[in-house]
Image (cartoon, rainbow, N blue to C red):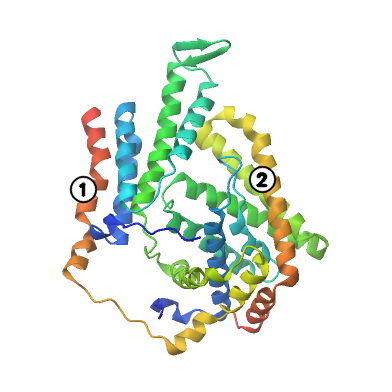
Amino acid sequence: MKKRMPGPTRGLSSRRDTVALLGALCLFLSALEYLVPKPLPFFRLGLSNLPILLGLPFLSPGDLILLLILKVLGQGLINGTLVSHVFLFSLAGSSASLGVMAFVRYVGKDRVSMVGVSLAGAMASSLVQLFLAIVLVFGQSAVVIAPLALGSGWISGLIIGIFAERFARSSQFLAALKSHYRDSPP
Amino acid sequence: MTRKKRRDYISALAAPAPRFLFGLAALPGFFLVDRLLFLVLLVLYYGAWVLAAGKRIQWGYFIFFTVSVTFFHLLTPLGRVIVEIGMFKITEGALRSGLLRGLGLTGMVFISLASIHPALKIPGLPGDLLGRCFYYFDRILEEKHKITWKNFFASLDTLLLSQVNAYNKALKTDIAVPKTGSLRAAFCQFGLIWGIICTLPPWLVWILTR
Protein backbone atom coordinates (compact mmCIF):
# COMPACT_ATOMS: atom_id res chain seq x y z
CA MET A 1 0.00 0.00 0.00
CA LYS A 2 1.38 3.37 -0.95
CA LYS A 3 1.77 5.94 1.78
CA ARG A 4 0.87 9.58 1.42
CA MET A 5 4.07 11.59 1.78
CA PRO A 6 3.47 14.99 3.37
CA GLY A 7 5.04 17.42 0.89
CA PRO A 8 6.73 20.00 3.13
CA THR A 9 8.71 17.37 5.03
CA ARG A 10 10.73 16.41 1.97
CA GLY A 11 13.37 18.99 2.83
CA LEU A 12 13.98 17.67 6.34
CA SER A 13 17.43 16.28 7.11
CA SER A 14 18.10 12.65 8.00
CA ARG A 15 18.74 13.77 11.56
CA ARG A 16 15.24 15.15 11.80
CA ASP A 17 14.01 11.91 10.24
CA THR A 18 15.54 10.09 13.22
CA VAL A 19 13.63 12.39 15.56
CA ALA A 20 10.39 11.67 13.65
CA LEU A 21 10.94 7.90 13.95
CA LEU A 22 11.55 8.19 17.70
CA GLY A 23 8.44 10.39 17.92
CA ALA A 24 6.43 7.67 16.17
CA LEU A 25 7.76 5.18 18.72
CA CYS A 26 6.51 7.51 21.50
CA LEU A 27 3.03 7.48 19.96
CA PHE A 28 3.07 3.72 19.47
CA LEU A 29 4.13 3.07 23.07
CA SER A 30 1.51 5.55 24.26
CA ALA A 31 -1.14 3.56 22.37
CA LEU A 32 0.27 0.32 23.78
CA GLU A 33 -0.06 1.65 27.32
CA TYR A 34 -3.84 1.70 26.95
CA LEU A 35 -3.68 -2.10 26.93
CA VAL A 36 -1.91 -2.28 30.29
CA PRO A 37 -4.40 -2.41 33.18
CA LYS A 38 -3.97 0.46 35.64
CA PRO A 39 -3.81 -0.33 39.37
CA LEU A 40 -4.96 3.25 40.15
CA PRO A 41 -7.09 5.55 37.95
CA PHE A 42 -4.42 8.28 37.85
CA PHE A 43 -1.44 5.93 37.55
CA ARG A 44 0.39 6.02 34.23
CA LEU A 45 3.41 3.94 33.41
CA GLY A 46 4.75 6.56 30.99
CA LEU A 47 5.99 4.10 28.35
CA SER A 48 6.05 6.95 25.83
CA ASN A 49 8.99 8.47 27.72
CA LEU A 50 11.15 5.50 26.73
CA PRO A 51 12.28 6.94 23.32
CA ILE A 52 13.33 10.22 25.00
CA LEU A 53 15.40 8.26 27.50
CA LEU A 54 16.94 6.21 24.67
CA GLY A 55 17.66 9.31 22.59
CA LEU A 56 19.25 11.23 25.47
CA PRO A 57 22.81 9.92 24.94
CA PHE A 58 23.07 10.79 21.25
CA LEU A 59 20.48 13.40 20.20
CA SER A 60 21.44 17.09 20.23
CA PRO A 61 19.61 19.31 22.78
CA GLY A 62 17.58 20.92 19.97
CA ASP A 63 16.49 17.56 18.60
CA LEU A 64 15.58 16.35 22.09
CA ILE A 65 13.28 19.36 22.46
CA LEU A 66 11.77 18.62 19.03
CA LEU A 67 11.19 15.01 20.11
CA LEU A 68 9.44 16.27 23.24
CA ILE A 69 7.22 18.58 21.14
CA LEU A 70 6.41 15.69 18.78
CA LYS A 71 5.49 13.47 21.72
CA VAL A 72 3.11 15.89 23.43
CA LEU A 73 1.62 17.28 20.19
CA GLY A 74 1.17 13.81 18.71
CA GLN A 75 -0.48 12.49 21.86
CA GLY A 76 -2.69 15.58 22.04
CA LEU A 77 -3.82 15.03 18.46
CA ILE A 78 -4.33 11.28 18.65
CA ASN A 79 -6.03 11.29 22.04
CA GLY A 80 -7.88 14.53 21.23
CA THR A 81 -6.70 16.29 24.39
CA LEU A 82 -4.86 19.14 22.65
CA VAL A 83 -7.08 21.89 24.10
CA SER A 84 -7.52 20.47 27.59
CA HIS A 85 -5.72 20.49 30.93
CA VAL A 86 -4.40 16.99 30.05
CA PHE A 87 -2.21 18.57 27.36
CA LEU A 88 -0.88 21.16 29.81
CA PHE A 89 -0.06 18.43 32.34
CA SER A 90 1.65 16.36 29.67
CA LEU A 91 3.68 19.31 28.36
CA ALA A 92 4.75 20.48 31.82
CA GLY A 93 5.55 16.97 33.11
CA SER A 94 7.48 15.94 30.00
CA SER A 95 9.43 19.23 29.88
CA ALA A 96 10.44 18.96 33.55
CA SER A 97 11.36 15.33 33.06
CA LEU A 98 13.51 16.07 29.98
CA GLY A 99 15.23 19.00 31.68
CA VAL A 100 16.15 17.01 34.77
CA MET A 101 17.17 13.89 32.80
CA ALA A 102 19.41 15.97 30.53
CA PHE A 103 20.97 17.66 33.57
CA VAL A 104 21.60 14.35 35.38
CA ARG A 105 23.03 12.86 32.20
CA TYR A 106 25.26 15.94 31.61
CA VAL A 107 26.57 16.02 35.18
CA GLY A 108 26.78 12.27 35.78
CA LYS A 109 27.93 11.28 32.27
CA ASP A 110 28.15 7.46 32.05
CA ARG A 111 28.40 7.06 35.83
CA VAL A 112 24.62 7.32 36.14
CA SER A 113 22.67 4.37 34.72
CA MET A 114 19.52 4.75 32.64
CA VAL A 115 17.55 3.65 35.69
CA GLY A 116 19.01 6.58 37.67
CA VAL A 117 18.32 9.05 34.87
CA SER A 118 14.78 7.70 34.44
CA LEU A 119 14.07 7.92 38.19
CA ALA A 120 15.23 11.56 38.29
CA GLY A 121 13.03 12.41 35.29
CA ALA A 122 10.00 10.61 36.69
CA MET A 123 10.30 12.40 40.03
CA ALA A 124 10.59 15.79 38.30
CA SER A 125 7.54 15.02 36.18
CA SER A 126 5.53 13.83 39.20
CA LEU A 127 6.46 16.93 41.24
CA VAL A 128 5.47 19.34 38.47
CA GLN A 129 2.21 17.51 37.77
CA LEU A 130 1.42 17.41 41.48
CA PHE A 131 2.01 21.15 41.69
CA LEU A 132 -0.32 21.74 38.72
CA ALA A 133 -2.92 19.41 40.22
CA ILE A 134 -2.88 21.43 43.44
CA VAL A 135 -3.00 24.80 41.70
CA LEU A 136 -5.41 24.04 38.85
CA VAL A 137 -7.54 21.05 39.79
CA PHE A 138 -7.83 19.85 43.37
CA GLY A 139 -6.81 22.80 45.55
CA GLN A 140 -4.44 22.78 48.53
CA SER A 141 -6.09 19.75 50.14
CA ALA A 142 -4.50 17.61 47.44
CA VAL A 143 -1.20 17.74 49.34
CA VAL A 144 -2.43 14.55 51.03
CA ILE A 145 -2.08 12.63 47.76
CA ALA A 146 1.56 13.72 47.38
CA PRO A 147 3.05 10.47 48.78
CA LEU A 148 0.85 8.39 46.47
CA ALA A 149 1.66 10.54 43.41
CA LEU A 150 5.39 10.58 44.10
CA GLY A 151 5.41 6.88 45.00
CA SER A 152 3.70 5.88 41.75
CA GLY A 153 6.06 8.22 39.85
CA TRP A 154 9.02 6.47 41.46
CA ILE A 155 7.69 3.01 40.48
CA SER A 156 7.02 4.04 36.86
CA GLY A 157 10.46 5.69 36.61
CA LEU A 158 12.08 2.50 37.86
CA ILE A 159 10.18 0.28 35.42
CA ILE A 160 10.90 2.56 32.42
CA GLY A 161 14.58 2.75 33.43
CA ILE A 162 14.85 -1.05 33.56
CA PHE A 163 13.08 -1.32 30.17
CA ALA A 164 15.47 1.25 28.67
CA GLU A 165 18.58 -0.51 30.06
CA ARG A 166 17.44 -3.83 28.70
CA PHE A 167 16.42 -2.47 25.31
CA ALA A 168 19.57 -0.35 24.83
CA ARG A 169 21.85 -3.29 25.69
CA SER A 170 20.63 -5.54 22.89
CA SER A 171 18.97 -3.23 20.37
CA GLN A 172 20.24 -3.30 16.79
CA PHE A 173 17.72 -0.61 15.92
CA LEU A 174 19.23 1.80 18.41
CA ALA A 175 22.76 1.09 17.15
CA ALA A 176 21.65 1.69 13.54
CA LEU A 177 19.78 4.84 14.52
CA LYS A 178 22.80 6.25 16.36
CA SER A 179 25.14 5.68 13.43
CA HIS A 180 22.54 7.03 10.97
CA TYR A 181 22.18 10.14 13.13
CA ARG A 182 25.91 10.71 13.60
CA ASP A 183 26.72 10.19 9.91
CA SER A 184 24.05 12.65 8.78
CA PRO A 185 24.76 16.36 8.44
CA PRO A 186 22.78 18.56 10.90
CA MET B 1 -4.32 -4.92 19.81
CA THR B 2 -7.04 -4.39 17.25
CA ARG B 3 -9.99 -2.18 18.03
CA LYS B 4 -12.95 -1.66 15.73
CA LYS B 5 -12.75 1.80 14.21
CA ARG B 6 -15.91 3.84 14.70
CA ARG B 7 -17.30 6.31 12.22
CA ASP B 8 -16.51 9.99 12.78
CA TYR B 9 -19.69 11.89 11.87
CA ILE B 10 -18.16 15.30 12.62
CA SER B 11 -15.70 14.85 9.73
CA ALA B 12 -18.64 15.27 7.37
CA LEU B 13 -19.41 18.64 8.95
CA ALA B 14 -16.00 20.25 9.25
CA ALA B 15 -12.42 19.93 8.05
CA PRO B 16 -9.83 19.45 10.85
CA ALA B 17 -8.77 23.14 10.99
CA PRO B 18 -12.21 24.80 11.43
CA ARG B 19 -13.21 21.90 13.66
CA PHE B 20 -10.29 22.72 15.95
CA LEU B 21 -10.85 26.49 15.81
CA PHE B 22 -14.57 26.26 16.64
CA GLY B 23 -13.74 23.94 19.53
CA LEU B 24 -11.24 26.49 20.77
CA ALA B 25 -13.85 29.27 20.45
CA ALA B 26 -16.31 27.25 22.57
CA LEU B 27 -13.95 27.00 25.55
CA PRO B 28 -14.18 30.57 26.97
CA GLY B 29 -17.98 30.47 26.74
CA PHE B 30 -18.01 27.09 28.45
CA PHE B 31 -15.88 28.37 31.34
CA LEU B 32 -18.14 31.38 31.81
CA VAL B 33 -21.14 29.13 32.59
CA ASP B 34 -21.54 29.05 36.38
CA ARG B 35 -24.96 27.38 36.73
CA LEU B 36 -24.46 23.76 37.76
CA LEU B 37 -27.50 22.38 35.97
CA PHE B 38 -26.54 24.00 32.66
CA LEU B 39 -22.96 22.87 33.08
CA VAL B 40 -24.08 19.26 33.56
CA LEU B 41 -26.26 19.53 30.45
CA LEU B 42 -23.38 21.00 28.43
CA VAL B 43 -21.02 18.24 29.60
CA LEU B 44 -23.55 15.60 28.48
CA TYR B 45 -24.05 17.49 25.21
CA TYR B 46 -20.34 17.50 24.41
CA GLY B 47 -20.11 13.88 25.58
CA ALA B 48 -22.66 12.99 22.90
CA TRP B 49 -20.51 14.78 20.31
CA VAL B 50 -17.44 12.85 21.44
CA LEU B 51 -19.38 9.65 20.68
CA ALA B 52 -20.43 11.16 17.33
CA ALA B 53 -16.73 11.72 16.62
CA GLY B 54 -16.27 7.96 16.89
CA LYS B 55 -14.32 8.16 20.13
CA ARG B 56 -14.90 6.24 23.34
CA ILE B 57 -15.58 7.85 26.70
CA GLN B 58 -14.39 6.19 29.86
CA TRP B 59 -17.38 7.33 31.91
CA GLY B 60 -16.06 5.65 35.06
CA TYR B 61 -12.84 7.63 34.84
CA PHE B 62 -14.60 10.98 34.41
CA ILE B 63 -17.07 10.28 37.21
CA PHE B 64 -14.20 9.30 39.51
CA PHE B 65 -12.31 12.41 38.41
CA THR B 66 -15.23 14.78 39.13
CA VAL B 67 -15.98 13.10 42.47
CA SER B 68 -12.35 13.26 43.59
CA VAL B 69 -11.98 16.93 42.60
CA THR B 70 -15.17 17.70 44.53
CA PHE B 71 -13.97 15.67 47.53
CA PHE B 72 -10.71 17.63 47.77
CA HIS B 73 -12.62 20.90 47.57
CA LEU B 74 -14.88 19.71 50.41
CA LEU B 75 -11.83 19.39 52.67
CA THR B 76 -11.69 23.20 52.74
CA PRO B 77 -15.10 24.28 54.17
CA LEU B 78 -16.75 27.25 52.48
CA GLY B 79 -20.20 28.69 53.16
CA ARG B 80 -23.27 27.12 54.75
CA VAL B 81 -23.03 23.60 56.20
CA ILE B 82 -25.40 21.26 54.34
CA VAL B 83 -24.59 17.91 55.95
CA GLU B 84 -22.37 16.85 58.83
CA ILE B 85 -20.92 13.34 58.82
CA GLY B 86 -19.03 13.03 62.10
CA MET B 87 -16.15 15.51 61.90
CA PHE B 88 -16.62 15.96 58.15
CA LYS B 89 -18.75 18.92 57.11
CA ILE B 90 -20.13 19.24 53.60
CA THR B 91 -20.43 22.94 52.88
CA GLU B 92 -22.45 24.51 50.08
CA GLY B 93 -19.67 26.71 48.69
CA ALA B 94 -17.06 23.94 48.66
CA LEU B 95 -19.47 21.46 47.04
CA ARG B 96 -20.44 23.97 44.38
CA SER B 97 -16.88 25.05 43.57
CA GLY B 98 -15.69 21.42 43.52
CA LEU B 99 -18.45 20.33 41.14
CA LEU B 100 -17.92 23.40 38.92
CA ARG B 101 -14.19 22.65 38.70
CA GLY B 102 -14.58 18.90 38.15
CA LEU B 103 -17.38 19.25 35.57
CA GLY B 104 -15.59 22.18 33.93
CA LEU B 105 -12.42 20.16 33.34
CA THR B 106 -14.39 17.11 32.20
CA GLY B 107 -16.32 19.27 29.73
CA MET B 108 -13.08 20.79 28.46
CA VAL B 109 -11.70 17.32 27.73
CA PHE B 110 -14.95 16.44 25.91
CA ILE B 111 -14.78 19.62 23.77
CA SER B 112 -11.17 18.77 22.98
CA LEU B 113 -11.99 15.15 22.12
CA ALA B 114 -14.80 16.23 19.80
CA SER B 115 -12.89 18.99 18.04
CA ILE B 116 -9.46 17.46 17.53
CA HIS B 117 -8.89 15.30 14.48
CA PRO B 118 -5.53 13.53 14.01
CA ALA B 119 -5.26 15.03 10.49
CA LEU B 120 -5.10 18.56 11.90
CA LYS B 121 -2.11 20.31 10.32
CA ILE B 122 0.26 22.13 12.65
CA PRO B 123 2.28 24.92 10.93
CA GLY B 124 6.07 25.22 10.86
CA LEU B 125 8.83 22.74 11.63
CA PRO B 126 6.86 20.88 14.36
CA GLY B 127 4.04 20.42 11.83
CA ASP B 128 6.39 19.10 9.16
CA LEU B 129 8.02 16.75 11.62
CA LEU B 130 4.64 15.62 12.88
CA GLY B 131 3.63 14.67 9.32
CA ARG B 132 6.70 12.48 9.04
CA CYS B 133 6.15 11.13 12.56
CA PHE B 134 2.59 10.05 11.68
CA TYR B 135 3.94 8.39 8.53
CA TYR B 136 6.20 6.21 10.67
CA PHE B 137 3.46 5.69 13.24
CA ASP B 138 1.14 4.35 10.49
CA ARG B 139 3.87 2.02 9.27
CA ILE B 140 4.52 0.68 12.78
CA LEU B 141 0.78 0.16 13.33
CA GLU B 142 0.48 -1.67 10.00
CA GLU B 143 3.22 -4.09 11.01
CA LYS B 144 2.37 -4.38 14.70
CA HIS B 145 1.32 -8.02 14.20
CA LYS B 146 5.05 -8.77 13.99
CA ILE B 147 5.41 -7.80 17.65
CA THR B 148 4.92 -10.70 20.04
CA TRP B 149 4.45 -10.40 23.81
CA LYS B 150 6.76 -13.40 24.32
CA ASN B 151 9.70 -11.76 22.54
CA PHE B 152 8.53 -8.20 22.98
CA PHE B 153 11.87 -6.35 22.90
CA ALA B 154 13.44 -8.45 20.15
CA SER B 155 10.38 -8.30 17.88
CA LEU B 156 9.90 -4.56 18.46
CA ASP B 157 13.58 -4.05 17.71
CA THR B 158 13.36 -5.94 14.41
CA LEU B 159 10.28 -3.96 13.36
CA LEU B 160 11.91 -0.63 14.22
CA LEU B 161 15.17 -1.56 12.49
CA SER B 162 13.28 -2.00 9.22
CA GLN B 163 11.95 1.57 9.55
CA VAL B 164 15.28 3.42 9.89
CA ASN B 165 15.45 5.98 7.08
CA ALA B 166 12.40 4.35 5.45
CA TYR B 167 10.85 7.74 4.71
CA ASN B 168 13.81 9.04 2.74
CA LYS B 169 14.09 5.74 0.86
CA ALA B 170 10.36 5.82 0.09
CA LEU B 171 10.64 9.36 -1.28
CA LYS B 172 12.62 7.99 -4.24
CA THR B 173 9.82 5.65 -5.32
CA ASP B 174 6.62 7.01 -3.85
CA ILE B 175 4.99 10.21 -5.06
CA ALA B 176 2.32 12.10 -3.21
CA VAL B 177 -1.07 12.19 -4.88
CA PRO B 178 -3.03 15.24 -3.75
CA LYS B 179 -6.69 14.63 -3.04
CA THR B 180 -9.04 16.22 -5.53
CA GLY B 181 -11.68 18.65 -4.30
CA SER B 182 -15.38 17.87 -4.12
CA LEU B 183 -18.56 19.70 -3.21
CA ARG B 184 -18.61 17.93 0.15
CA ALA B 185 -14.98 18.88 0.76
CA ALA B 186 -15.78 22.50 -0.03
CA PHE B 187 -18.76 22.35 2.36
CA CYS B 188 -16.51 20.98 5.11
CA GLN B 189 -13.87 23.60 4.46
CA PHE B 190 -15.45 26.27 6.64
CA GLY B 191 -17.33 23.99 9.03
CA LEU B 192 -20.07 26.52 9.77
CA ILE B 193 -22.57 23.88 10.92
CA TRP B 194 -19.99 22.55 13.35
CA GLY B 195 -19.43 26.13 14.47
CA ILE B 196 -23.13 26.45 15.35
CA ILE B 197 -23.22 23.02 17.02
CA CYS B 198 -20.01 23.39 18.99
CA THR B 199 -19.41 27.07 19.69
CA LEU B 200 -22.86 28.54 20.05
CA PRO B 201 -24.43 26.55 22.98
CA PRO B 202 -22.09 27.60 25.84
CA TRP B 203 -22.09 31.25 24.74
CA LEU B 204 -25.88 31.17 24.44
CA VAL B 205 -26.24 29.65 27.93
CA TRP B 206 -23.90 32.27 29.35
CA ILE B 207 -25.79 35.16 27.73
CA LEU B 208 -29.21 33.82 28.81
CA THR B 209 -28.18 33.09 32.41
CA ARG B 210 -26.23 36.27 33.15
Q: Looking at this view, is B146 or A66 the one in front?
A: B146
Q: Quadrant of residue B162?
A: bottom right
Q: Which chain contains the residue that carries disc 1?
A: B
Q: Looking at this view, is B121 or B183 the one in front?
A: B183
SS of the residue under disc 2: helix
Question: How far from the left and from the top, in percent, is residue B153?
Answer: 67, 67
In the rendered image, the quadrant that contains the N terminus of chain A is bottom left
Q: Looking at this view, is B168 or B152 the one in front?
A: B152
What numbered label is drawn on residue A79? none
Tags 1 and 2 in contact by the CB under 8 Å rule? no
In the rendered image, the quadrant that contains the C terminus of chain A is bottom right
Q: Is residue B43 above or below residue A122?
A: above
What numbered label is drawn on residue A153? 2
The residue type indicated by label 2 comes to Gly
Work out which residue is located at the far right of the displayed protein and give it: A111
Residue A103 visible in rendering: no
Question: How far from the left and from the top, in percent, is residue B11?
Answer: 28, 59
Badge 1 and badge 2 in a common chain: no
Q: Residue at x 53, y 69 (%)?
A: B145
* Left or right of B147 on screen, residue B170: left
Question: How far from the left and from the top, in percent, is residue B6?
Answer: 35, 57
What's the distance in space between the residues labelled 1 and 2, CA to CA? 42 Å
Q: Residue at x 23, y 57 (%)?
A: B13
The residue type indicated by label 1 comes to Ile
Q: Is residue B20 above or below residue B72?
A: below
SS of the residue under disc 1: helix
